[in-house]
């Protein structure tokens, strides 16, 4: 592979794209920092680049297809570039990727964060230390994704992740704190803690609660947000942490099904009643909390009655957002061989019903805040309209001639708009 070195004032241009989970986003962000520190210039995905990197996902067959499409599109846009595929699809099916483009460098999950050294050792990159913030990597500098843990050994019957995220481990708390301090110094206002299953964090005698205690005590980050948790991981001690208002009142609490019989076939470790009780505990402890979730429809053997049980639980829970997934059979999983595989028509019908309920619940949740004033971390501007997020994950839009990017300001909520709400911002709040 002939790749321009970053010599004679010629920086190697690198684009980094990511599919799937927030852990992939966190890893892509780490790669951007590492490559920028090695002297590369990070450019937006789809731009001309010498190296194009994709952190892939394989949770569904759609994710696999998106990765293959990305490779073909990137080769058309950058015919002479080095394409690198890493992540879970690359871990599971390196041969499929090579069949798409024989010149793709495939890096498995265990080696992806050592990419700079891999490129250097193979003569594909000449390291010229230049520690700078890779500003071009992100659309904004408001939120940073920090990997605290990876790997899972639960082996839910539908999930391929334990096969491609092997050897679970948690990072050292001091290393995480140092990284968050650096993100604060780089201007980020919010950090999102992510991993394969962050509720299992355990390192140097600290669990997730202990890690949060250190982060809140030892950093000045304005906002701290968590990604997905399991119902059985929610404890009274963990919920008490939210007395610190820097912790965002937003819980992504995985559901998957509201039917006990389906949950048993999925290999989940809770019942529908236990899930609803956990939702109640969170709501009693944390005002205005947003609870979001994932639901799989059309799981093998799912009857109409079992699907109705899921609908009923969702109605009881009153989610702020539901991510709906039609079941996708994955290799190396027990569910792929189960009887009663649903046909596409059934899955599409149930998906449509669940999406309709999700829309109704999202609008109902947003309507609760009409007339309220909420703090918004403004992120980006398009056609004169700014958008940002509240601590409880409500997307807010406003029109302003002022530059709001990376500011946290109060916004008066004034009705539904697009996928969120419209907010009014006072000039005096911008200038303070």
Image (cartoon, helix red, strand yellow):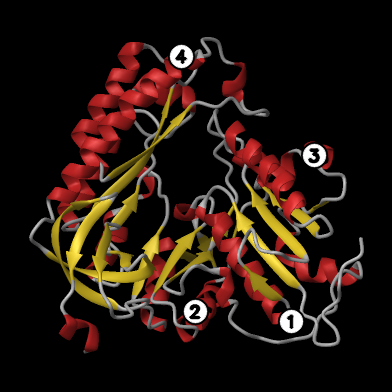
- Give x and y (percent) for residue 407: 32, 78
Quadrant assignment for the C terminus: bottom left
Residue with the mark numbered 2 = 183
Left or right: where 31 falls relative to 211: right
Residue with the mark numbered 1 = 39
| Residue 318 visible, this orientation | no
Q: Nearer the viewer, mark 2 or mark 4?
A: 4
How far apart marks 2 and 3 lie (CA) works out to: 37 Å
Q: Nearer the viewer, mark 2 or mark 1?
A: 1
- Crowding around mark 4 (Cα neighbors within 10 Å: few <14, some 14 to 19, many 20+) is few
How far apart marks 3 and 4 lie (CA) works out to: 30 Å
The foreground one among 57 and 416 is: 416
- Crowding around mark 1 (Cα neighbors within 10 Å: few <14, some 14 to 19, many 20+) is many
- Give x and y (percent) for residue 174: 54, 77
How far apart marks 3 and 1 lie (CA) works out to: 30 Å
| Pointer 2 or 4: first along the chain | 2
Residue with the mark numbered 4 = 345
Could you say which quadrant of the image residue 12 lies in? bottom right
Residue at the image point whose x is 49% and y is 79% from the top: 183
| Residues marked 2 and 1 touching at CB (< 8 Å) | no
Is residue 87 depicted above or below 293 in this figure? below
| Pointer 3 or 4: first along the chain | 3
User: Mark on residue 126?
Assistant: none
Residue with the mark numbered 3 = 100
């Amino acid at each position: 592979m002939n790749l321009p070195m970053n010599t004679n004032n010629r920086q190697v241009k690198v684009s980094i794209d990511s599919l799937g989970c927030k852990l992939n986003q966190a890893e892509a962000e780490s790669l951007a920092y590492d490559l920028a520190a090695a002297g590369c210039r990070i450019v937006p995905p789809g731009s001309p680049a010498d190296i194009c990197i994709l952190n892939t996902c394989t949770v569904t067959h759609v994710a696999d297809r998106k990765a293959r499409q990305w490779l073909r599109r990137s080769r058309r846009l950058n015919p002479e570039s080095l394409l690198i595929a890493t992540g879970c699809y690359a871990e599971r099916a390196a041969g499929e990727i090579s069949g798409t483009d024989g010149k793709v460098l495939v890096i498995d999950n265990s080696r992806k964060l050592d990419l700079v050294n891999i490129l250097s050792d193979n003569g594909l990159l000449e390291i010229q230390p230049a520690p700078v913030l890779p500003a071009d990597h992100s659309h904004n500098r408001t939120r940073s994704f920090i990997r605290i843990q990876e790997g899972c050994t639960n082996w839910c019957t539908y999930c391929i992740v334990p096969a491609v995220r092997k050897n679970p481990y948690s990072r050292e708390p001091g290393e995480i704190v140092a990284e968050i301090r650096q993100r604060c110094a780089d201007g980020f206002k919010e950090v999102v803690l992510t991993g394969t299953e962050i509720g299992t964090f355990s390192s140097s005698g600290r669990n997730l609660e202990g890690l949060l205690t250190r982060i809140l005590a030892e950093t000045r980050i304005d906002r701290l947000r968590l990604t997905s948790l399991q119902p059985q991981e929610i404890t009274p001690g963990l919920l008490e942490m939210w007395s610190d208002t820097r912790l965002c009142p937003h819980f992504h609490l995985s559901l998957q099904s509201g039917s006990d019989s389906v949950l048993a076939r999925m290999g989940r470790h809770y019942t529908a009643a236990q899930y609803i009780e956990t939702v109640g505990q969170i709501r009693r402890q944390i005002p205005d909390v947003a609870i979001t979730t994932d639901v799989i429809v059309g799981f093998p053997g799912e009857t109409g009655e079992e699907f109705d049980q899921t609908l009923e639980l969702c109605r009881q829970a009153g989610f702020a957002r539901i991510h709906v997934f039609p079941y996708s059979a994955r290799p190396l999983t027990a569910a792929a061989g189960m009887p009663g595989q649903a046909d596409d028509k059934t899955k599409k019908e149930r998906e449509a019903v669940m999406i309709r309920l999700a829309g109704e619940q999202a609008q109902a949740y947003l309507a609760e805040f009409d007339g309220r004033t909420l703090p918004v971390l403004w992120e980006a501007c398009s056609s004169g309209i700014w958008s940002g997020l509240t601590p409880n994950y409500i997307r807010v839009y406003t029109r302003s001639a002022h530059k709001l990017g990376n500011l946290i300001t109060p916004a008066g909520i004034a009705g539904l708009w697009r996928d969120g709400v419209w907010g009014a911002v006072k000039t005096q709040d911008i200038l303070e």
